[in-house]
Amino acid sequence: MFLTEKQLVGLKTKTKSGQFLGKIIGLEINGDNLQIEKIIIAQSPLAKKILGDKLIIDRSQVVEVTETEMVVEDAGLTVGVAAKEASLAE
């Protein structure tokens, strides 16, 4: 399945265990191979309290993408926090 950026932005994102994380607000694309490397999530109020405003998910953490949602590994929360902190340091 192919989805456009317009279809991805705004897509609901949840973990495999069903925890709603938020919605996609942006993408980081590798300029060398034009692949999506990171997905930027505006978090739900609950996740925001724990992790801050944005969560950055690596493409390796994505389990499934459909026209209605993206599902990520539960462990992605921990890695996403590290990625978020790294991006803030830049």
Image (cartoon, grey):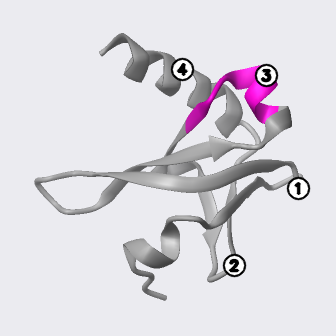
In percent of width and height, residue 35 lies at: 28, 61
Q: CA distance from mark 3 to mark 1?
A: 17 Å
- The reply to whether the C-beta atoms of the residues labelled 3 and 1 are less than 8 Å apart is no
Of 6 and 65, nearer the camera is: 6
Q: CA distance from mark 1 to mark 4?
A: 22 Å
Residue appearing at x 58%, y 46% in the figure: 41
Q: CA distance from mark 4 to mark 2?
A: 27 Å
Q: Which residues are magenta?
A: 47-55
Q: Which residue is mark 4?
A: 82
| Viewport quadrant of the C terminus | top left
Question: Which element is circle 2 on?
Answer: loop
**In which quarter of the view is residue 55 placed?**
top right
Above/below status of 56 relative to 38: above
Q: Can you tell which mark lies on residue 18? A: 1
Q: Can you tell which mark lies on residue 68? A: 2
* Amino acid type assigned to the residue bearing label 2 in the image: Thr
Return the residue found at the far left: 32
Of badges 3 and 4, the one in the foreground is 3
**How many C-alpha atoms fall within 10 Å of the one at disc 3: few (<14), some, or many (≥20)?**
few
Which of pointers 4 and 2 lies earlier in the amino acid sequence? Answer: 2
* Amino acid type assigned to the residue bearing label 4 in the image: Ala
Which of pointers 2 and 1 lies earlier in the amino acid sequence? Answer: 1
Instruction: Find out whether residue 54 is within the magenta segment.
Output: yes
* Amino acid type assigned to the residue bearing label 1 in the image: Gly
**In which quarter of the view is residue 36 placed?**
bottom left
Which of pointers 3 and 1 lies earlier in the amino acid sequence? Answer: 1
Q: Which residue is mark 3?
A: 50
* Amino acid type assigned to the residue bearing label 3 in the image: Ile
